[in-house]
Image (spheres, grey):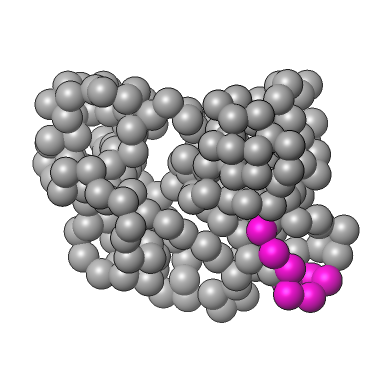
Amino acid sequence: MKLANKLTIFRGDYRYVKHKRSVSCLSSDNVGAPVYVSGNPVGTVWSVASADPANSNKMPAVGILISKDTATTGIISLFDEVNVYTELIPGKKYYVINGGISLSPPPGEVQIIGIAQSETTLFLPGNLGGGTEDNVDDDVLIDDIDLSSFYVGRAITGTATSASLWQVKKVVEQSGDIIVFQFADGSHARNKCWDDRTSYTYS
C-alpha cells in the first residue's frame, strides 16, 4: 500500500501505521518544527511550512519536519516516534507553537502534537487529516479497503468497537498522490460504530 507503509504494531486485526512524506519546505523551516500543508503537491512531494497557532491559515499541523536534504526539501513524520528533540519530559503532552513544540498551550489555535516517551522521543499519534480532533489518549484503528484506501476509527482508549462513540473516516489516495478524507455519513462527530464502518455512506 503506497499511502500507509507496511506495519509494525498490531492491535487485533487492525493496524497502527508508520508514515513519512517527502516535502518541499521553506529555508527558514527548522528540523523539529510542526508543519502544515501550505500548497498543492508537486507529484508525490508535499508542500509544507512551519505551523503557527496564531494564524488559522497555518493550522493544523500535519506532522513534524524530521530531516532536511537541502535548504528547501526534507522529510516529515505524520505519525510515529520522532527523535529530533532533547530534554523532553516523559509522559507530558506537547503543543504546537510557531517553529516548535511547548508544554504550554499557546494563544490562538490549540493543538496537541504528541506525547513524550523519553527525553529524546516524541510519539505523534496523528489524526490522519480532517480536523483538529487529535487526542494522544485515543485508540486509532486502521482497516484496509484496498491498495489505495482504508478506514480509520478514532475513539477514547478502551471504547468498545460496538459502541456509537467513534469517529470513522475513509482515507483514499487518488491519482497524483492526492489524499482525500471522507467521513461516515459526512460527520466529523464521534457518534459512529466502528463495527458498522462498511455500512456508512462517506463524504
Does any portion of residue 120 appear in the rendered image? yes
Does any portion of residue 130 appear in the rendered image? no
Q: In which quarter of the image is the N terminus?
A: bottom left
Q: Quadrant of the C terminus?
A: top left
Residue 147: x percent and y percent?
A: 25, 69
Q: Is residue 32 left or right of residue 111?
A: right
The range drawn in magenta is: 66-73
Residue at (37%, 71%) from the top-left corner?
2
Residue 107: x percent and y percent?
A: 78, 21
Depicted 164 relative to depicted 44: above or below: above
Q: In this view, does 29 lie to the left or right of 35?
A: right
The answer to which image quadrant residue 92 occupies is top right
Depicted 75 relative to depicted 33: above or below: below
Instruction: Report the predominant secondary structure element of the magenta stretch.
Output: strand
Q: In this view, does 13 lie to the left or right of 114?
A: left
Q: How many labels does the image show?
A: 0
The answer to which image quadrant residue 169 occupies is top left
